[in-house]
Amino acid sequence: MKIGYVQTSPIFGEITQNFEQVEDLLGNTKGDLIILPELFATGYTFISKEEAESMAETTEGKTANFLIGLAEKTGAVIVGGFIEKDGNHIFNSSMIVSDNEVLGTYRKLHLYYKEKLWFSPGNKPLKIYEAKKTKVGIMICFDWFFPEMFRSLALLGAEIVAHPANLVLPYCQKAMETRCLINRVFAVTSNRIGNEVRGDDNFTFTGGSQITSYNGEVLSSAPKDKPHIDFVEIDVNQARDKNLNKYNNVIRDRRTEFYSLE
Ligand code: ACM
């Protein structure tokens, strides 16, 4: 199975240009699973809730149409971030699409910094999606900070975690090695690069998109400051075997009766 990421440099508010950037980077690349960054079409650093609302869409909007077209062209299932509108609420979401439909959305559970001013926190149960005969779970950027998140996706059966991101801290990539190792799950972190100075905020996004193997090995690592795409071939069966050795199984060996998760 061929999985990969597109690391872009979104221009704030320039949705059409941001779509073109993804298309240009992909060219005629084919794959099975492609992950795009968090909020890849809009940019990240909003200055008001109204501004974020003005770029919000449903799963019938232009971002969904763009991703469906891209899925058709690449032959891949695609996961990418967008602002999801649902009634009076907007969410920092990612949608997963195949060549003719939106399979579903994930609404970010752990909002970072001023995202709490613009977005409602995720309100849907976690779900695993079937993509090319593999099981894909989704989390977004800062969700990595909460180990329960990746573990929950693993317990629900995720074999690959799709991780659209707009990282501004330098810690995630290292942490993903451990997340993957201790759950025996693959992950694709698709980050962005560039700088956004808006309102009081000045964010430099840290790039370094990464494909991490079920055993914690880094299979691909993007530059910190350049657009980049990469794909690797994986054997997803490796994520189905939770035995670390003859005696240890990373899921069955848990002593849940002694853990307090409150
Ligand atoms: C982040 O969660 N976008 C930092």
Image: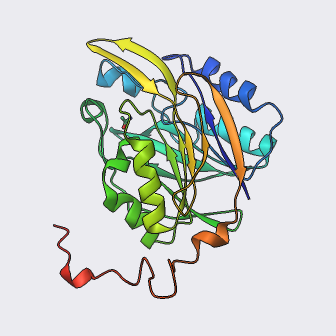
From this viewpoint, is residue 201 visible?
yes
The quadrant in which the N terminus is found is bottom right
Residue at the (43%, 66%) spot, across then down: 182
Q: Nearer the viewer, residue 155 or 176?
A: 176
Ligand 1 shows up in the quarter that is top left
Residue at the (54%, 22%) spot, across then down: 225
Q: As drawn, is 174 to the left or to the right of 36?
A: left
Residue 51 percent coordinates (x, y) = 37, 20
Residue 23 percent coordinates (x, y) = 73, 28
Residue 90 percent coordinates (x, y) = 37, 37
Q: As drawn, is 67 to the left or to the right of 43?
A: right
Instruction: Determine whether 115 is above or below 241 in the image.
Output: above
Instruction: Determine whether 243 is above or below 89 in the image.
Output: below
Q: Nearer the viewer, residue 219 or 46?
A: 219
From this viewpoint, is residue 140 visible?
no
Residue at the (48%, 32%) spot, across then down: 39
Instruction: Determine whether 159 is above or below 145 in the image.
Output: below
**Residue projecting furthest to the right:** 28
Which colour assignment does the render follow?
A: rainbow
Quadrant in the rendering for residue 115 = top left
Q: Nearer the viewer, residue 76 or 181?
A: 181
Residue 183 percent coordinates (x, y) = 45, 67
Residue at the (59%, 34%) spot, across then down: 222
**Residue projecting furthest to the bottom:** 247
Q: As drawn, is 262 to the left or to the right of 13?
A: left
The quadrant in which the C terminus is found is bottom left
